[in-house]
Image (cartoon, rainbow, N blue to C red):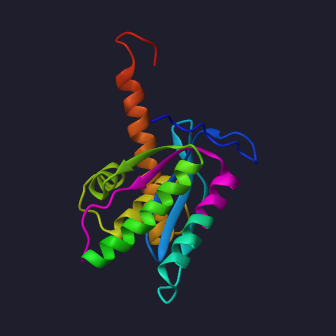
Amino acid sequence: MTALPPPPHPEGPPVPGRVLGVDPGSTATGWAVLERQRGRYLLVAHGVIRTSSDDPIPQRLCRIHAGLQAVLSEHRPALAAIEIIFQHRSSESALRLGQARGVALLALGQAGLDVGEYNPMTVKKSVAGHGGAGKPEVQRVVQRLLGLPQPLAADAADAVAIAITHLAVGAFAAHAARPPGAPA
């Protein structure tokens, strides 16, 4: 199968080093756009795409897709990262989460982005230092890392943590791929 060429960016080319983190959900999909500048994380934009559980699932999925397309068009990330479904309370909620995740992956793929996929434990370890961190702890750590006066909404903070994980893993992978003795 041949890879499709990336679509043209109507607002201009992707911004190098800019990553979109996505925390998918059927009622709340968090997103965050980050860059790393001079060793620090810079939050470019963040938000939560909300849907009503009273709406039919096709309508909710369309809203998630359209919301992510708008974010991609406005902020032009060069990379993306999304959380993997690890385990869930029930099969029905796992199915709904999988549908939301699929729609998010579709939007990222349509934008021609390479997508990193991380399980929740890896994200929590990367940001909080241990895989058992709860949402409030992730919110506090993200707030400190970004120097924010107040914590972000939980879904947006999770999206930031996913983006930070991708930037950290990407930097580590680039470092590990360098030949011995090559300049950093």
Q: Which residue appears at 30% of the width and 68% of the height?
A: 134
Q: Going by the picture, which residue comes out furthest to the bottom?
A: 54
Q: Is residue 7 above or below residue 57?
A: above
Which residue appears at 65% of the width and 47% of the height? Answer: 76
Question: In this rendering, does residue 143 appear at all?
Answer: no
Q: Position of residue 184 (x, y in %)?
A: 46, 19
Look at 34% across and 57% down and name the residue there: 84
Q: Position of residue 19 (x, y in %)?
A: 54, 46
Residues rendered magenta in the picture:
67-90
State the residue at coordinates (51%, 36%).
3
Q: Quadrant of residue 65?
A: bottom right
Question: Magenta segment: does it hold 7?
Answer: no
Q: Between 117 and 130, which is closer to the camera in this rendering?
A: 117
Query: Where, by quadrant of the figure, is residue 23 drawn?
Result: bottom left
Report the residue that reaches farthest toward the top.
181
List x then y, in percent, for residue 38: 56, 35
Question: Is residue 31 rendered to the left or right of residue 73?
Answer: left
Q: Is residue 102 above or below residue 7?
A: below
